[in-house]
Amino acid sequence: MPEISRFFGIIIRMYVEAGGQHRTPHFHAYYQDQVGIYGIDRIERLAGSLPKRQERLVLAWAELHQEELLSDWQALQEGRPPAKIEPLK
């Protein structure tokens, strides 16, 4: 699963499921042993969970980079690698 960003101990990854496309554009956010899955069209948690502070950081980052996330999603659907996205600083 390609890593597209990393900040404050949070790793953001996005991938295409082998054999078919996912229905909803989304990304995965990992923090320690927890994972949250977040929608891109509408920035919201779809599944999983992160601690509140880390979730707020992920949501803020996603709002700032929504267009880039959608572009990366499209690239993956077309079989191209995603671009790295600037982390929060």
Image (tube, rainbow, N blue to C red):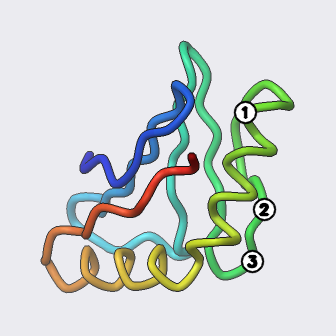
Quick check: 87 left or right of 19?
right
Question: Where is residue 16 drawn, in percent x and y?
Answer: 30, 63
Q: How many residues crowd mark 1 within 10 Å: few (<14), some (14–19), many (20+)?
A: some
The three-letter code of the residue at mark 2 reads: Glu
Residue 41, image quadrant: bottom right
Residue 44 numbered mark, or none: 2
The residue located at (81%, 45%) in the rendering is: 56
Farthest residue, direction front? 89
Residue that carries the numbered disc 3 in the rendered image = 42
Label 3–label 2 contact, CB within 8 A = yes
Mark in front: 1 vs 3: 1
Q: Is residue 82 above or below residue 2?
A: below
Q: Earlier in the sequence, mark 1 or mark 2?
A: 2
- Give the residue at the far top of this rendering: 33
- Kindly identify which numbered label has been placed on residue 54: 1
Please state which amino acid type lies under the numbered disc 3.
Arg
Q: Nearer the viewer, mark 1 or mark 2?
A: 1
Q: Residue furthest left?
A: 80
Rounded to the nearest angstrom, the CA distance separating label 1 from label 3 is: 18 Å
Graded by Cα atoms within 10 Å as few (under 14), some (14 to 19) or many (20 or more), the crowding at tag 3 reads few
Amino acid type, label 1: Gln
- Residue 32 position within the rendered picture, expressed as x and y whole percent measured from the top left: 54, 15
Residues under labels 3 and 2: Cα distance? 6 Å
Return the x and y of residue 79 as percentages of the image width and height. Answer: 14, 77
